[in-house]
């Protein structure tokens, strides 16, 4: 059994809507480097990656892509690519070395230059406040387990709204909460490397959601004009094994179930924001592990958001069992199913269609795919090029699936490829490459890959020749 190809297959099709956002993304710790330059203080990822054995071959983000010094070159590459939006994240410890208190003037100046440079290039900045790099100073004070995180983050968002809100109109508060609490606090595979009881993880998750709400309030109060604000969720899509009504409903039910004792339950994060309540099945399943939740907490969490930000990579097939209950298909997509260099990234191109359909039906908001990408062991060939046909094929399949959603009236407003540059891939270090641009980490030479030029043509044609 093979992974199903996108139902929107075909050599040509109608172009994407004129207002569709074509973007690429990156994150501060993964590309900036300059970890102790110009007043930046350590983040939890500096501390984690500098501990032997935590990251592949003990790689760190100390230098990464040196974007802190090479941002002009990188913006020029974005302009050549033709994207109309760039999703970036801000380094909290570069801006507020202690996490709170006095801002770092040189950190603020860096992001002023970067935002102004993007705008001059005709690229709209989509800014994420938190992409996993908590100031270590705040971790020493309890991090996400401390209720004060809500106000720490709110003050940080307030500062960014005041400093950048005259030019930035698209914001995300947090990137991938399930990873922050799941991989960072429950499983210990990501910074800060903790393995906490489930009840403590739920408490940290509740604080994160309240911090999101406080951040939304601060941004709306401080930004100078109308803004679009959300956060970037993630999950692993449940894809109906067939498009029968029974399989579709089984996949939908499984997708939003919130009973696994992990942090990777999509509805656990999304329902409180949109509906102002935690999913009933999760509350019942977690019982005594539940944190104390007040009505005031839920009012704070459920601040209005404007879209669903969603990072979508992979998925697995689900079908209805004999009693209609969802069940994973034994063997998944089958042995030998195509996948990326990272084993978890099985190629499942219908993931974007079903993520868009299920989430917009449930939450009534437009969706933007804030990440989607393919990891490959790319290298510079003898002819000087970096040829990555697998990545091109991957993007084509997933974009066809998005096109299907749009043609069916599902409100998909944008797509950000992850990532613009090869970069530090967290615990995998530098061995796996997601970028449209190859980075030689020894020389910092940038080489646009074949996929860079292909994506440029897709953007120019508005996807007419997928």
Image (cartoon, rainbow, N blue to C red):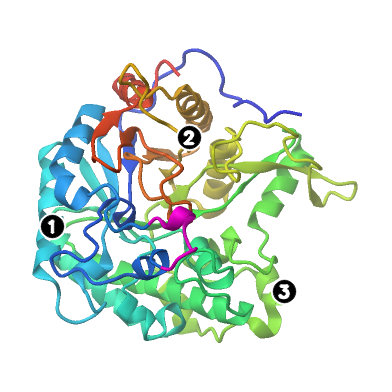
The spot of residue 445 in percent (x, y) is 23, 35
Q: Secondary structure at mark 3?
A: helix
Residue 376, numbered circle: 2
Residue 285, numbered circle: 3
Q: As drawn, is 267 to the left or to the right of 412?
A: right
Q: Are marks 2 and 3 in contact (CB under 8 Å)?
A: no
Q: Quadrant of residue 232?
A: bottom left
Q: As drawn, is 58 to the left or to the right of 130?
A: right
Q: As drawn, is 37 to the left or to the right of 207?
A: left
Between the C-alphas of marks 2 and 1, the distance is: 31 Å
Q: Is residue 58 magenta?
A: yes
Q: Tag 1 or tag 3, which sits nearer the N-term?
A: 1
| Residue at x-position 27% and y-position 47% | 65
- In the image shown, does 212 or 109 lie closer to the viewer? 109
Q: Secondary structure at mark 2?
A: loop
Depth check, mark 2 against mark 3: the one in front is 2
Residue identifier under label 1 = 110
| Residue at x-position 53% and y-position 42% | 313
């Amino acid at each position: 059994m093979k992974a199903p190809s996108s139902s929107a297959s075909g050599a040509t099709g109608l172009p994407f809507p004129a207002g569709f956002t074509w973007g690429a993304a990156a994150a501060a710790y993964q590309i900036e480097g300059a970890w102790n330059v110009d007043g930046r203080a350590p983040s939890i990822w500096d501390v984690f990656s500098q501990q032997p054995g935590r990251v592949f071959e003990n790689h760190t983000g100390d230098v990464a892509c040196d974007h802190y010094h090479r941002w002009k070159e990188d913006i020029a590459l974005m302009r050549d690519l033709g994207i109309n939006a760039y999703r970036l994240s801000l380094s909290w410890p570069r801006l507020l070395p202690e996490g709170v208190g006095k801002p770092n003037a040189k950190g603020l100046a860096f992001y002023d230059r970067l935002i102004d440079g993007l705008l001059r290039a005709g690229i709209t900045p989509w800014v994420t406040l938190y992409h996993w790099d908590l100031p270590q100073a705040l971790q020493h004070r309890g991090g996400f387990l401390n209720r004060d995180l809500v106000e720490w983050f709110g003050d940080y968002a307030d500062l960014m709204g005041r400093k950048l809100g005259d030019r930035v109109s698209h914001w995300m508060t947090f990137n991938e909460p399930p990873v922050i609490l799941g991989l960072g606090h429950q499983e210990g595979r990501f910074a800060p490397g903790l393995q906490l009881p489930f009840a403590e993880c739920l408490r940290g998750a509740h604080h994160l959601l309240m911090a999101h709400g406080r951040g939304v309030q601060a941004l709306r109060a401080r930004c100078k004009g109308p803004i679009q604000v959300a956060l970037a969720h993630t999950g692993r899509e449940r894809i109906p094994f067939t498009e029968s009504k029974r399989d579709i409903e089984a996949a939908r039910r499984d997708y939003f179930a919130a009973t696994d004792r992990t942090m990777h339950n999509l509805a656990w994060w999304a329902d409180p924001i949109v509906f102002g309540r935690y999913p009933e099945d999760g509350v019942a399943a977690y019982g005594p592990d539940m944190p104390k939740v007040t009505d005031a907490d839920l009012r704070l969490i459920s601040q209005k958001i404007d879209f669903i930000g969603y990072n979508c990579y992979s998925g697995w097939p689900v079908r209805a069992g004999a009693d209609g209950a969802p069940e994973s298909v034994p063997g998944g997509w089958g042995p030998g199913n195509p996948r990326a260099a990272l084993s978890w990234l099985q190629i499942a191109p219908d993931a974007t269609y079903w993520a868009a359909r299920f989430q917009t039906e449930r939450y009534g908001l437009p969706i933007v795919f804030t990440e989607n990408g393919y990891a490959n062991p790319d290298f510079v060939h003898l002819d000087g090029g970096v040829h990555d046909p697998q990545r091109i094929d991957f993007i084509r399949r997933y974009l066809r699936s998005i096109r299907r959603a749009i043609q069916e009236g599902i409100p998909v407003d944008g797509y950000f490829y992850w990532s613009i540059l090869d970069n530090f891939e967290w615990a995998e270090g530098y061995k796996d490459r997601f970028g449209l641009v190859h980075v030689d980490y020894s020389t910092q030479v940038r080489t646009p890959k074949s996929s860079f030029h292909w994506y440029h043509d897709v953007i120019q044609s508005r996807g007419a020749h997928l």
